[in-house]
Image (spheres, coloured by chain):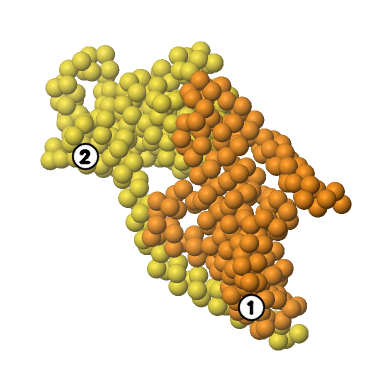
């Protein structure tokens, strides 16, 4: 029961982007297309699972005074390993994800979950939490990226949706940085309304 | 206190050893792949020079050539293209570097012997997504380059005939100008045959190249 709760926690109730407002930098940067959002989400989820696993495994060995540097070393090592292995053995995937991989290091969701969850919970719960958070992060990015790609380029996952007439004169701001902030504001507002309705106007 | 440092050192040590081991295994594979990628790009671009033939590439060291780019070293890397077993050149491939809006754009260009561009592809760019990044799309800017001669590589905004991409004049100008300067430098080095008479006569060009071949 608690495992299922851990797993679903990150998807809605504590969604890292919409509820905790973590990982905004990569979130705003790579949501220019759905393809990029999926790639970044997959890479971040993988690192999140690995780092949560290790941090939870060594949670009793690492003294609390030096835990933050230890987490950073663990996360950075995983990111670099993923980068090198992917570059060597999966060059095609690396080509499309390559630019996002270094960005994962600065993704504070990963450090946040290591510090906020994995260092106090058993390995299996931590991995479940990482999977849930990863899915939640990916979902949030796909939502914003869908709006941005659709409005700014007239396509969804590189498929032409709104027709070539729209593509010739799209709403360019949606794909630029200001558009990311504006759309994120709308989405966050929407979630707040949802929350208020559910909470009975507290 | 001492114990804390020791533990931290241990963590860093394990991480460093793991990274070193993986790197020593993956680095050579990555290097081979980079080279292969470049070869593939060259093959793709140069295919337009002689469709259907397998091509051979030889690097030319064009020494004494003024560097038209601020970002790379003193020589322009030009690759001679030939169809084996014949060793006479049928054209060139070179990489043009142009400072764009947010990156130095690398364009691989294939030209015929008379300096007429036959194909181009973008090797690297980090321009604004949705705007300058569209430079990679062959149906936009670089699609209009095929068949042009060096002096025609000027944007409409600058008095030439090439349409810049909407909203990204800087990117378009960088690519266009970098190709022009590269071609002009090659022309100065005497790599191109005289356009006026030889271009109409393919036999003449081959003759010219086989007798002249002292550039390598």
- Image: A20 above or below B178: below
Q: Residue furthest right?
A: A202
Q: Position of residue B114 (x, y in %)?
A: 28, 23
- Residue marked by disc 1: A122
Left or right of A82: which side holds B197? left
Q: Nearer the viewer, residue A125 or B199?
A: A125
Compared across the picture, whether A197 is left or right of A28 comes to right
Query: Image quadrant for the N terminus of chain B?
Result: bottom right
Depth check, front residue: B161 or B183: B161
* Residue B63 drawn at (x, y percent): 36, 39
Q: Residues within 10 Å of mark 2 (few under 14, many from 20)?
A: some
Kindly indicate the quadrant of the structure image that contains residue A14.
Answer: bottom right
Above or below, A63 against B140 in this view is: below
Q: CA distance from mark 2 to mark 1?
A: 60 Å
Determine if residue A175 is in view: yes
Residue receiving disc 2 = B55
Residue at x-position 64% and y-position 78%:
A122
Q: Quadrant of residue B127?
A: top right
User: Subunit of mark 1?
Assistant: A
**Is B191 in front, or is B37?**
B37
x 58%, y 31%: residue = A152
* Residue in view at x 26 percent, y 26 percent: B113
Mark nearest the camera among 2 and 1 is 1
**Where residue B19 sits in the image (x, y, percent)?**
50, 70
Mark 1 element type: loop
Work out whether A139 lies above or below A146: below
Instruction: Give the letter of the chain under mark 2.
Output: B
Tell me the shade of chain B.
yellow
Q: Are marks 2 and 1 on the same chain?
A: no
Which chain comes out orange in the rendered image? A
User: Label 2's element?
Assistant: loop
The number of numbered discs placed on residues in the rendered structure image is: 2
């Amino acid at each position: 029961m608690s495992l299922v709760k851990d797993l679903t926690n990150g998807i809605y109730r504590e969604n890292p982007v919409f509820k905790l407002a973590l990982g905004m930098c990569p979130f705003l940067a790579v949501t220019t297309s759905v393809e990029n959002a999926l790639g970044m989400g997959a890479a971040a989820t993988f690192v999140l699972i690995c780092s949560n696993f290790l941090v939870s495994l060594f949670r009793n060995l690492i003294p609390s005074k030096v835990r933050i540097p230890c987490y950073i070393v663990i996360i950075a090592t995983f990111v670099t390993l993923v980068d090198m292995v992917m570059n060597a053995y999966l060059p095609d995937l690396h080509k499309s994800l390559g630019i996002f991989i270094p960005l994962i290091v600065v993704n504070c969701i990963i450090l946040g979950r290591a510090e906020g969850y994995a260092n106090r919970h058993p390995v299996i719960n931590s991995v479940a939490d990482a999977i849930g958070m990863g899915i939640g992060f990916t979902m949030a990015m796909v939502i914003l990226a869908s709006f941005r790609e659709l409005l700014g380029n007239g396509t969804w996952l590189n498929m032409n949706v709104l027709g070539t007439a729209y593509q010739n004169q799209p709403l360019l701001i949606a794909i630029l940085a200001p558009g990311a902030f504006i759309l994120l504001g709308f989405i966050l507002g929407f979630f707040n309304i949802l929350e208020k309705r559910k909470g009975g106007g507290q | 206190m001492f114990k804390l440092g020791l533990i931290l050192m241990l963590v860093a040590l394990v991480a460093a050893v793991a990274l070193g081991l993986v790197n020593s295994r993956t680095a050579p594979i990555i290097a081979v792949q980079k080279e292969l990628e470049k070869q593939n790009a060259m093959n793709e671009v140069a295919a337009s020079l002689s469709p259907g033939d397998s091509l051979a590439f030889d690097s030319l060291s064009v020494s004494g050539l003024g560097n038209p780019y601020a970002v790379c070293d003193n020589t322009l890397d030009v690759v001679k293209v030939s169809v084996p077993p014949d060793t006479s050149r049928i054209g060139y491939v070179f990489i043009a570097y142009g400072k764009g809006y947010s990156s130095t754009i690398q364009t691989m260009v294939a030209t015929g012997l008379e300096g007429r561009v036959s194909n181009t592809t973008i090797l690297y760019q980090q321009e604004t997504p949705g705007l300058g990044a569209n430079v990679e799309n062959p149906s936009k800017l670089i699609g209009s380059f095929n068949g042009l001669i060096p002096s025609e590589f000027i944007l409409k905004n600058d008095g030439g005939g090439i349409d810049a991409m909407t909203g990204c004049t800087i990117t378009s100008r960088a690519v266009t100008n970098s190709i022009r300067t590269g071609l002009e430098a090659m022309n100065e080095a005497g790599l191109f045959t005289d356009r006026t008479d030889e271009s109409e006569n393919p036999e003449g060009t081959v003759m010219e190249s086989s007798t002249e071949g002292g550039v390598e």
